[in-house]
Image: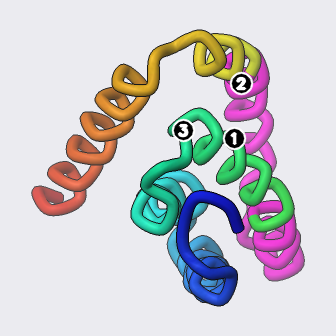
Amino acid sequence: MDQGSPAWMTVLVGLVLGVLVSLTSVGAGALGTIALLLLYPKLPIVKIVGSDIAHAVPLTLLSGLGHWYLGTVNFMLLGSLLAGSVPGIILGSVAARYAPDTLLKTILGVILALVGVRMLVK
């Protein structure tokens, strides 16, 4: 591992994220990014986000397959989400490459704070 914590700590975070994503669908992005920021404070935010997204692909794929097997996937909802998400992924990836680190950290912090407040209020 470069610029941060030992590998075993990252493996432990991966274990926790795997459980949380399967149980709640929260984790791969929100908690994963926070954990990686804490473990690798010197790594540029764009690399943390990119690594977390690359990690989320197999994590959410396997979790999604488990839920599909259990019959808990709404395919109409899934299709609608993907129709908007695919163009959003392209726009967000390009924007992340050129955005300053401080802007990305601010955006991430605001989004996480809003989600946290929303969860506490509901």
The majority secondary structure of the magenta stretch comes to helix
| Disc ID at residue 44 | 3
Residue pointed to by mark 1: 50
The magenta span reads 60-89
Q: Which picture quadrant has residue 98? A: top right
Please provide percent x and percent y for residue 84: 69, 21
- Out of 69 and 48, give the one closest to the viewer: 48
Disc 3 marks which amino acid?
A: Pro
| Magenta segment includes 75 | yes
| Disc ID at residue 89 | 2
Taking the spot 83% from the left edge, 78% from the top edge, the residue there is 66
Q: Nearer the viewer, mark 1 or mark 2?
A: 1
Per the image, label 1 sits on a secondary structure element best described as helix
| Magenta segment includes 81 | yes
Sort mark 2 into few (<14), some (14-19) or many (20+) by Cα contacts within 10 Å.
Answer: few
Per the image, label 3 sits on a secondary structure element best described as loop
Please provide percent x and percent y for residue 69: 88, 78
Q: Which picture quadrant has residue 119? A: bottom left
Q: Is residue 108 left or right of residue 47?
A: left
